[in-house]
């Protein structure tokens, strides 16, 4: 059987948030998103098979600035490559 391992080369540090890989499977990865100032977990980005793309899964209701949302979107965009 020919296994394909995922190669990861993405920007993980942004001004307000950062991402850390928590799980690596053959074709997908899971990432923890944290707030840089408080170090609090905002939740994860992982593969959502129903939509066949990476999605952001927040832990609790939170308020996000335009900049934070752009950083999350940029990170997901990198995972699509």
Image (spheres, rainbow, N blue to C red):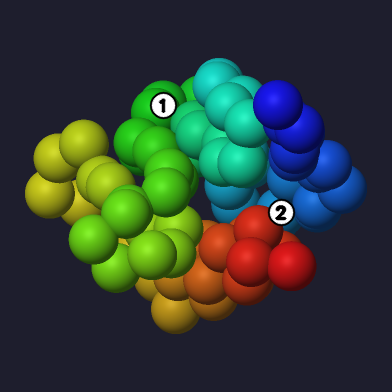
Please determine whether, in this image, residue 55 is positioned above or below residue 47.
below
Q: Residues within 10 Å of mark 2 (few under 14, many from 20)?
A: some
Please determine whether, in this image, residue 29 is positioned above or below residue 53.
above
Quick one: quadrant of the N terminus?
top right
Could you tell me if residue 55 is visible in this image?
yes
Residue pointed to by mark 1 = 40
**Tag on residue 19?**
none
Instruction: Tell me residue 25's x, y (percent).
Output: 58, 27
Q: Residues within 10 Å of mark 1 (few under 14, many from 20)?
A: few
Could you tell me if residue 37 is visible in this image?
no
Instruction: Tell me residue 50's x, y (percent).
Output: 23, 61
Sequence-first tag of 1 and 2: 2
Please determine whether, in this image, residue 27 is positioned above or below residue 66.
above
**Tag on residue 14?**
2
Q: Residue furthest top?
A: 22
The Cα atoms of the two marked residues, 1 and 2, are separated by 15 Å
Q: Nearer the viewer, residue 41 or 44?
A: 44
Considering the numbered disc 1 on the image, is that residue within a helix, a strand or a loop?
loop
């Amino acid at each position: 059987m020919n296994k394909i391992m995922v190669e990861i080369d993405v920007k993980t540090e942004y001004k307000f948030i950062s991402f850390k890989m928590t799980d690596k499977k053959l074709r997908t990865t899971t990432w923890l998103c944290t707030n840089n100032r408080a170090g609090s977990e905002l939740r994860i980005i992982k593969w959502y098979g129903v939509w066949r793309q990476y999605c952001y899964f927040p832990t609790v209701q939170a308020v996000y600035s335009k900049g934070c949302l752009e950083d999350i979107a940029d990170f997901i965009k990198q995972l699509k490559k």
